[in-house]
Amino acid sequence: MRNLRNHRFPTVADSEELIEVMNVVTTAAKKADAGLATNRSITAKEREKLLAQRIVSPNFQWSLPGRAVMYSPDRVLSVLINEEDHIRVQALRDSDDIQGAEQVASAFLREMERHASFAWSTEQGFLASSVYNCGEGRRYSTMMHLVGLGHDESREKVFDALLEKKITVRGLFGEGSRPIGAFAQVSTTLAPLGEFMGAVDFLTDLERASRKRLEGSKLQRKAKEALEYVKASPRISLPNSFRVLGWLRWAIANEVAGFPTDLKRIDLALNSLDLLMHENVDYADGKRADTLRELLQL
């Protein structure tokens, strides 16, 4: 997260200033030679695809003046302009390469600093529209599949303990969303990288232990029910699609017979499944069911 010096935050700036901020940011990015494509206006379907790929947030207001998104051809690096703050830089890597993601984002911001001036103070660090986000101006985040902890009575205590360390567990779409299908986003804006990575390792160990304690036959039954549900259902809602993918992912990871063998297909489905929120509900649910069957080759 960064904000330009001598400009009001997006929450209070008028249209003229927001457009000026957008122009400053896009010009600086071009001078930085980051190779980012810039979109200032997109269709509802394009927006949903970017949302499913975690490039934009659900609350990003495309229709308002001065809004834009920039991203690299491989979608590893993306930049939201005039969301909650002037700039939100995001770098995506595998969950075991958080340091690599930080290096990508930091390298881009260093180049941007050569062509734009960011708001910063010795007392608060980088300034943000929310006082709680002032400081380092960064968030570490990773996606996790916590199907074991989802059935463990100790999960709330575990999540509360993480919260005391300034580490939160949220839904796939970030702030304000809830975990569905045991898929969750673990993130922090305050904990140092080493502590955050330690928390991720801690959750991973707990998840493995929880899966071992669970009754295998019960989980296999639920996974098979999920598979049959995808095969037979003419319509599947968005929440149910995540629940189904959660069970199928568990079955594939445990090499249960009768299921698809490629775990990457589940992860591809999570990242490419159209949300279709702008469509008629029945049409969207039907299209989603067809898409799931196609992605899973059922």
Image (cartoon, rainbow, N blue to C red):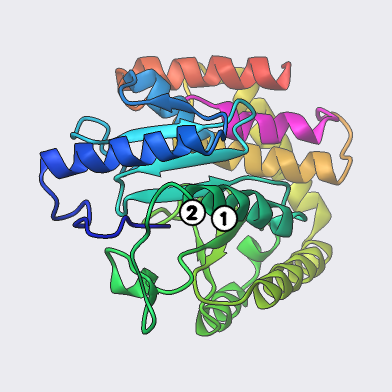
Question: Which of the two residues, 13 or 281, is positioned nearer the viewer here?
Answer: 13
Residue type, mark 1 in image: Ala
In the rendered view, does 264 fall on the left or right side of 102? Answer: right
Q: What is the quadrant of the N terminus in the image? A: bottom left
With respect to residue 113, does 213 lie above or below? below
Quadrant of res 65: top left
Residue at 22% in and 51% down: 10
Position in image of residue 3 (x %, y %): 33, 57
Please tell me which of labels 1 and 2 falls first in the chain.
Answer: 2
- Please, is residue 46 above or below residue 164 in the view? above
Kindly indicate the quadrant of the structure image that contains residue 157. Answer: bottom right
Q: Position of residue 203 (x, y in %)?
A: 70, 69
Residue depicted at 83% across the width and 30% down the height:
262
Q: Nearer the viewer, residue 75 or 222?
A: 75
Q: Secondary structure at mark 2?
A: loop
The location of residue 20, given as percent across then percent down, is 22, 39
Q: Is residue 265 above or below residue 190?
A: above
- Specify whether 59 is left or right of 146: left
Q: Position of residue 277 (x, y in %)?
A: 34, 27
| Residue stretch rendered in magenta on the structure | 259-274
Neighbor class of circle 2 (other Cα within 10 Å; few <14, some 14-19, many 20+) is: some
Amino acid type, residue under disc 2 in the picture: Gly
Task: Look at 81% across and 64% down and name the residue there.
Answer: 208
Give how far apart the Cα atoms at labels 1 and 2 are: 5 Å
Q: Main secondary structure of the magenta part?
A: helix
Task: Assess disc 1: are there few (<14), some (14-19) or many (≥20) residues with their C-alpha within 10 Å of its C-alpha.
Answer: many
Q: Is residue 39 magenta?
A: no
Residue 264 within the magenta-colored segment of the rendering = yes
Q: Which mark is residue 184?
A: 1
Name the foreground residue: 207 vs 31. 31
State the residue at coordinates (29%, 38%). Answer: 22
Residue named by callout 2: 171
